[in-house]
Image: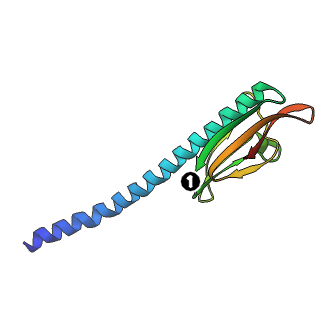
Amino acid sequence: MPIRLTVIFLILALTVPVIVGMAENLEKDAERSDLSVQAKIISDTARKTYYAGVGGMFTADISVNHNCRLDIGGESSDSYAIKMFRADEDVGMIVMDRPPVRIVEPLSLTGNLTLKFECVSYNEKTAVKVSVI
């Protein structure tokens, strides 16, 4: 009987840390996937707004986990990017390069939000302005 208990505890001692590690990775992958879906919604809406031309306006609802954030726009080449962060760890980026959609004002997004996308003229070129409604 004591040998059986020892073997059972040995098996548990070896498998529990592996299972806990897998659960943490699953949570991280799920949050990364959700961020990617939300970034795709922003990218698609920005692209649709860009194609509508100056004066075009659309809205989109997004939901970003409280532990995560999306940074859109920025300076120079960052103005064409949507960056995804999980607990301040960079987990991915979408570059809007076909067509090259520029976001004119940087914005950091988290929570349940409704965004307004507006196509504007910026330095004699077409760009998209995003704001929270």
Q: Amino acid at mark 1?
A: Asn
Residue 96 seen by the camera = no
Q: Residue 127's image quarter?
A: top right
Residue where numbered disc 1 is placed: 65
Image position of 126 with respect to 25: above or below:
above
Task: Please report the residue visible at 39 percent of the width from the left and 56 percent of the height from the top.
Answer: 23
Q: Secondary structure at mark 1?
A: loop
Provide residue 57's location: percent of width, then percent of height: 76, 33
Q: Residue lying farthest left? A: 1
Q: Residue lying farthest right? A: 124
Task: Please report the residue visible at 63 percent of the width from the left and 42 percent of the height from the top.
Answer: 61
Q: Nearer the viewer, residue 72 or 121?
A: 121
Provide residue 35's location: percent of width, then percent of height: 57, 46
Provide residue 79's location: percent of width, then percent of height: 78, 42
Q: Is residue 34 left or right of residue 21?
A: right
Image position of 7 with respect to 47: above or below:
below
Q: Residue 7's image quarter?
A: bottom left
Residue 3 seen by the camera = yes
**Which quadrant holds the N terminus?**
bottom left
Q: Tell me the crowding category of disc 1: few under 14, some 14 to 19, or many 20 or more residues within 10 angstroms, Cα based.
A: some
